[in-house]
Amino acid sequence: AATVAGEQVLSTTFTLPSGGSHHAIRANFRYQGGAAPCGGGGNFDDHDDLVFPAGGAVNFALAANGATASASSTLDAGRAASAAINGDRRGLHWGSGPSTGSGWHDATNNSYPDWLEVAFAGTRTINEINVFTLQDNYASPAAPTESMEFSLYGPTGFQVQYWNGASWLAVPNGSVAGNNKVWRRFTFAPIST
């Protein structure tokens, strides 16, 4: 029990297991409390839950982290370039909600090349790029996996490039042909872009 009045600072260190996409920790706080929530008479019984991404990787491509997106063309306002960097990996609200879902769609159907460019909020060091495409069942999309395939709408050939300060260069294995994956992950040695 605390013997000093006023603000108290509690700290501890945890070693969490590797793997998974998120970790969750629940901290229980109790001062002269019983099993019931906060009661009268100075008793205190409460908890806080913390959920955070495993590994601490930062997605610099998110608009929420200051990134911007531009494209060679845009079909309509519901499929703007900005919809590609809003954090939605499923394609929710396809064609109608670029701030909460959707994705980018060019205005030149079957005419190539097309491009989507993501500009970070300053130079960043990255070692991974993830590309997600429209699922066949876009009206009811599922959480994508790297084994999930499409047969209707996704790009079958594309390049993933980065700006080195003078020109665009392909990331390792970034020239893709015969693609049928909803989710393509590209990992490589750290680069600054």
Image (tube, grey):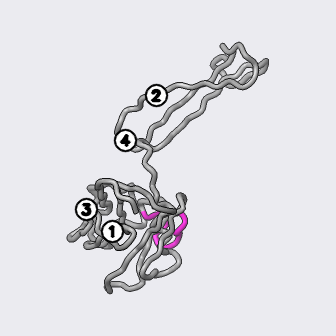
Q: Upstream in the sequence, badge 3 or badge 2?
A: 2
How crowded pointer 2 is (Cα within 10 Å; few <14, some 14-19, many 20+) is rated as: few
Look at 75% across and 23% down and name the residue there.
6
Above or below, 13 against 174 in this view is above
In the image, what residue type sits under mark 2? Phe
Q: Residues within 10 Å of mark 4 (few under 14, many from 20)?
A: few
Total marks shown come to 4
29 with respect to 87 (left or right):
right
C-alpha distance separating marks 3 and 1 = 9 Å
Mark 3 or mark 1: whose residue is earlier in sequence = 1
Per the picture, the main secondary structure of the magenta-coloured stretch is: loop
- Residue kind at label 4, given as amino acid type: Gly
Residue under pointer 4: 20
Gap in angstroms between the C-alphas marked 3 and 2: 36 Å
SS for tag 3? strand
The percent coordinates of residue 161 (x first, y second) are 33, 68
Instruction: Quickly name the residue at label 2.
Output: 14
Q: State the separation of the CA atoms marked 1 and 4.
A: 28 Å
Q: Are marks 4 and 2 in contact (CB under 8 Å)?
A: no
Which residues make up the magenta segment? Answer: 91-100
Q: Is residue 170 left or right of residue 36?
A: left
Q: Nearer the viewer, mark 1 or mark 4?
A: 1
Give x and y (percent) for residue 89: 42, 59
Q: Nearer the viewer, residue 176 or 167?
A: 167
Q: Regarding mark 1 in the picture, which secondary structure is present there?
A: strand
Judge depth for marks 2 and 1 and give the one in front: 1
Separation of residues labelled 2 and 1 (CA atoms)? 38 Å
Residue at label 1?
161
